Image (tube, helix red, strand yellow):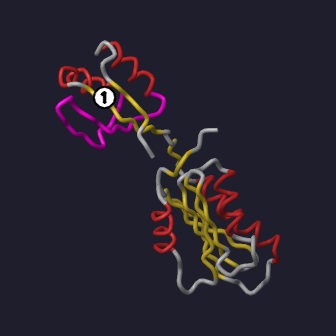
Amino acid sequence: MSRDTLAAPAEHLLEVRHSRFLARAAPADTPDAAMAHLRAVAVADATHNCWAWRIGAEYRSSDDGEPAGTAGRPILAAIDGQGFDRVAVVVTRWFGGIKLGAGGLVRAYGGAAAECLRQASRAPLVEEAELVLRAGFEDLGSVHQALGLHGADKLEEGFDAAGARFLLRLPADRVDALRRHLRNATRDRVRIDAAPD
């Protein structure tokens, strides 16, 4: 299933039995960016600032003092249920004097997060690949032309007596086309390997 991220930050306010739940979501490419969003929007004098984020296979959540499993996990479930990735959501609660019980908290936190994401503008995530390309000097013109045509970004480049070495990033669905293009343009002299992790 293809997933989306947020095109822009979003927020949604929900009131449940006099408690206010303010969900604020933002795109986050790294765990540090997710935690920076939490620090930026957490309200110091609110009753709770519960949160969750997902970035690929990594995720975290916090109930921030609410009963275990009643806030952070429902927020994370809302992120996953709405098909988002690289997203952080903080739901801030101001207690209104009426206890909601565990089920009520799950519905309120999860519902505020889900509605916030439902109303948010989406941006499709493009899966990217990193490659190492090695080419002789005689093929650099063909290489540079191919990189432009296939949307490849040079992250690093270096030269030695044998030629050039590039670290590239490009959309994963364009890798095979780039390989074919360069195989044909250089009579298979260019070497392309997956970048080491």
Residue 138, position as x, y percentages in the image: 18, 20
Residue 193, position as x, y percentages in the image: 41, 32
Residue 20 or residue 47, whichever sits in front: 47
Q: Main SS of the magenta segment?
A: strand
Residue for point 31% across, 12% down: 187
Does 48 appear above or below 107?
below
Does 195 appear above or below 115?
above
Q: Is residue 177 left or right of residue 103?
A: left
Residue for point 39% across, 22% down: 179
Residue 174 or residue 21, whichever sits in front: 174
**Within the magenta stretch, is there residue 182?**
no
Q: Amino acid at mark 1?
A: Leu
SS at badge 1: helix
Residue 133 or residue 168, whichever sits in front: 133
Examine the image and state in which quarter residue 143 appears.
top left
Residue for point 73% across, 68% down: 108
Does 92 appear above or below 126?
below
Residue 70, position as x, y percentages in the image: 75, 71
Q: Which residue is mark 1?
A: 147
Other-residue count near label 1 (Cα within 10 Å), few / some / many at <14 / 14–19 / ≥20: some
Q: Is residue 191 left or right of residue 74?
A: left
Residue 111, position as x, y percentages in the image: 71, 62
Furthest-front residue in view?
161
Q: Is residue 3 left or right of residue 192?
A: right
**Within the magenta stretch, is there residue 171?**
yes
Q: Which residues are magenta?
A: 150-174
Residue 184 or residue 134, whichever sits in front: 134
Quadrant in which the N terminus is drawn: top right
